[in-house]
Amino acid sequence: MVTQRQCKALTKAGAPCRMPPRVDSDYCWNHDRSVMTERAEARRRGGHNRRRRTGACPTSCDLRDIPAVQALLERAVSDTLAQENSIARNRSLGYLASLAMRAIESRLLEERVEAVEEQLAAFSAGAS
């Protein structure tokens, strides 16, 4: 029978830690003093990724504005890419990419309509 090694540290409650130790140590990642700076950096990064950012959308998230929608999609893609790789993450990225394509198409159509309207206005002004 093979027994798994356990961390030699005690929890705050005084019970033995049940996590497996690191390969080169008698302690797990949470209790090994040799990785304190690495652990602190991981906590900082984790907190940074969870922290809610403000200003994701320009001009108070007016979702009727195509650039604001594109900014929101960019933020969603960035946050999704920061997540651990999974099927759900990949589906979300595919869905966000299709939404981004629709937003780009809408922006291109809006630009074309504006150009046509400018030409019509110039034509109407010249005809009068």
Image (cartoon, helix red, strand yellow):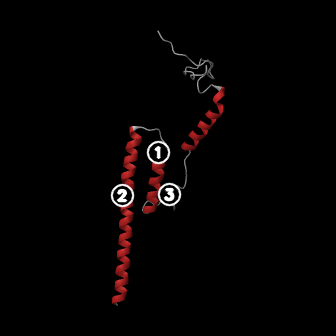
Which amino acid type corresponds to the residue marked 3 in the rendered image?
Answer: Cys
The kind of residue tagged 2 is: Arg
Give coordinates of residue 97: x percent, y percent.
Answer: 39, 51
Q: Badge 3 local density, few (<14 within 10 Å), some, or many (20+)?
A: some
Rounded to the nearest angstrom, the CA distance separating label 2 from label 1 is: 20 Å
Q: Residue at x 55, y 50 (%)?
A: 53
Residue 110 horizontal side relative to residue 36, left or right: left
Marks 2 and 3, the one that precedes in the sequence: 3
The circle on residue 57 is 3
Residue that protrudes farthest toward the top in the picture: 1
Closest to the observer: 53 or 97?
A: 97
Q: Three-letter amino acid code at disc 1? A: Leu
- Residue hosting label 1: 81
Quadrant position of residue 111: bottom left
Callout 1 crowding tier (Cα within 10 Å): few <14, some 14–19, many ≥20: some
Q: Helix, strand, or loop for circle 2? A: helix
Do callouts 1 and 3 mark residues in contact (Cβ within 8 Å)?
Answer: no
Work out how far the residue at label 2 is from the one at label 3, CA to CA, in angstroms. Answer: 18 Å
Image height check: is 77 above or below 109?
above
Disc 2 residue crowd, few under 14, some 14–19, many 20+, Cα 10 Å: few
Image position, residue 77 (x, y; %):
45, 49
Secondary element under disc 1, as helix, strand or loop, is helix
Give the residue pinned by disc 2: 102
